[in-house]
Image (cartoon, rainbow, N blue to C red):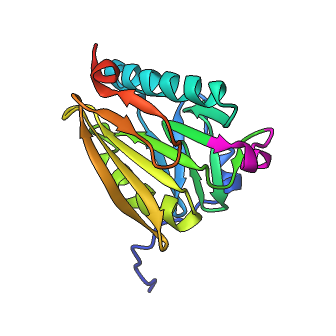
Amino acid sequence: MGVLTDEKKRFSYQDYLKTPEDKRYELIEGELVMTPSPVPYHQWVAMNIAFEIREFVKRNDMGKVFLSPCDVYLDDENVLQPDILFISNERINIIGEKNIQGAPDLVIEILSENTAYTDMVKKKRLYARFGVKEYWIVATGEKTVEVYSLKGGAFVLERSYSKDFILESPLLVGLKIGLSVVFEF
């Protein structure tokens, strides 16, 4: 008689590479997770934030900004696709031909109905473990942005901003984003 087990199959980066290109997947702690396409408002907010950061980064020659889908390879069991990410000039060497090979300096996740728990718990923990310096969680429903900084191996909430405020980044000193414009649709 066989032994019953509820152990899930663990996937690797090689398995991840075999997923269909017409669907979005992430590899989180060896679990292959399919993510539905974001809704239009999610994409609108992502584009607005990415535009503001890109303009600031470009003007100050600070590094590169990317939008999802862009694979961030953390290790063989963790390949994520943050909504927006920034890599400083000092770490530009982690930009590979096929993916980002290591933790970005800044990661921004925009919550959706299907990803909220993953973004706020699982991915947040992984980003901290692998050394992302700053993490933003954008809640489009509430029109808020929480800004976290990595301190002692864990994220600490620096500040929570609502749509009527101007967001400032501890990492990108001098960046100011008017959130009323970001959330306006």
Check residue 17 for magenta coloring.
no
Whether residue 15 sits left or right of residue 120 in the image: it is right
Q: How many labels does the image show?
A: 0
In front of the other: 112 or 162: 162
Question: Does any portion of residue 1 appear in the rendered image?
Answer: yes
Looking at the picture, how far across and down is residue 137, in whole percent? 35, 45
Looking at the picture, how far across and down is residue 135, in whole percent? 44, 50
In front of the other: 22 or 77: 77
In front of the other: 136 or 26: 136
Looking at the picture, how far across and down is residue 184, in whole percent? 28, 16
Quarter of the rendering occupied by the C terminus: top left
Question: Does any portion of residue 121 appear in the rendered image?
Answer: no
Quarter of the rendering occupied by the N terminus: bottom left
Tell me what residue is drawn at x 48 percent, y 24 percent: 52
In front of the other: 133 or 119: 133
Whether residue 177 sits left or right of residue 162 in the image: it is right
Report the span colored magenta.
Answer: 87-97
Tell me what residue is drawn at x 52 percent, y 64 percent: 29
Check residue 88 for magenta coloring.
yes
Looking at the picture, how far across and down is residue 173, in whole percent? 51, 42
Tell me what residue is drawn at x 61 percent, y 31 percent: 57
Whether residue 73 sits left or right of residue 29 in the image: it is right
Return the residue found at the far front. 174
